[in-house]
Amino acid sequence: GVTVNKIRAFEQWMNLVFPLHTLGVRLSYLPPHENFPDMTFTANAGFFRDGKIIVSNFKHEERRGESGEVCSYFLDILGFPVSVLPASRGNIPIFFEGQGDALWYGENTLVCGYGFRSNQEGIQAIHDSARCGRFISLELVKEHFYHLDTCFCPIGEDILWYPPAFSFESRK
């Protein structure tokens, strides 16, 4: 196993948080939960749209319990409206892993990735729920790039991306 240097980790955390705090950024902290160590990947918790959070439906069993924690936090602690996706559409499960697989390009184009964590049904459920303008879904095919945000980064009018992470159809 890996030994974590807690002092170094705390220093790194403070080097991130202190400048944000100094700039007046309002920070909120989703409390850790001993049963859900992957809650540190907060982008996967849900998708924000029009002042509400659409909570993720995680594919892997060990992460599914996070959804309840996220719902409680945003609704009860922060007072955000919360939307929950259905578990399935017909007999097909709906998997969607938040802003790890849904990124805005510009103001009106939502780009979503599917294949390893989110599936096409989950991406369609987000599209239906979020009522966004233009919508593009891209298939991820390299297992090391299991979320869209690992291989696709909108930067202003440009996009930084790793083409081999996507199917041939998606690259087109």
Image: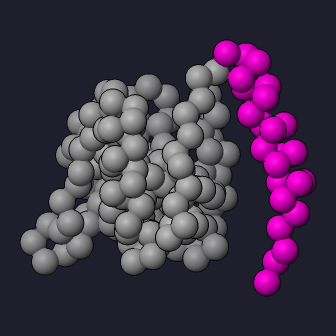
Q: Is residue 5 above or below residue 30?
A: below
Q: Is residue 136 something one can see in this rendering?
A: no
Residue nearest the observer in this picture, 64 or 107: 64
User: Magenta stretch containing residue 59, yes or no?
Assistant: no
User: Magenta stretch containing residue 11, yes or no?
Assistant: yes
Q: Is residue 7 above or below residue 153?
A: below
Figure quadrant of the N terminus:
bottom right
Q: In the image, residue 98 lies at what x, y percent?
A: 43, 52
In the image, what residue occupies the spot 40% across and 32% down? 78
Q: In the image, residue 61 lies at what x, y percent?
A: 39, 77
Q: In this view, does 54 lie above or below 133?
A: below
Callout count: 0
- Look at the magenta stretch and give its main secondary structure: helix
Q: Is residue 43 something one can see in this rendering?
A: yes
Residue nearest the observer in this picture, 6 or 164: 6
What colour scheme has been applied to the protein in the rendered image? one colour
In the image, what residue occupies the spot 14% across and 67% down? 89
Indicate left or right for 17 with 166 as reference. right
In the image, what residue occupies the spot 28% across and 49% down? 126
Considering every residue shown, the one lying at the far left of the view is 90
* Range covered by the magenta-colored residues: 1-24
Indicate left or right for 3 with 170 as reference. right
Indicate left or right for 150 with 172 as reference. right
Residue 48 occupies which quadrant of the picture?
A: top left
Q: In the image, residue 129 lies at what x, y percent?
A: 22, 43
Q: In the image, residue 66 lies at what x, y percent?
A: 42, 61
Considering every residue shown, the one lying at the far bottom of the view is 1
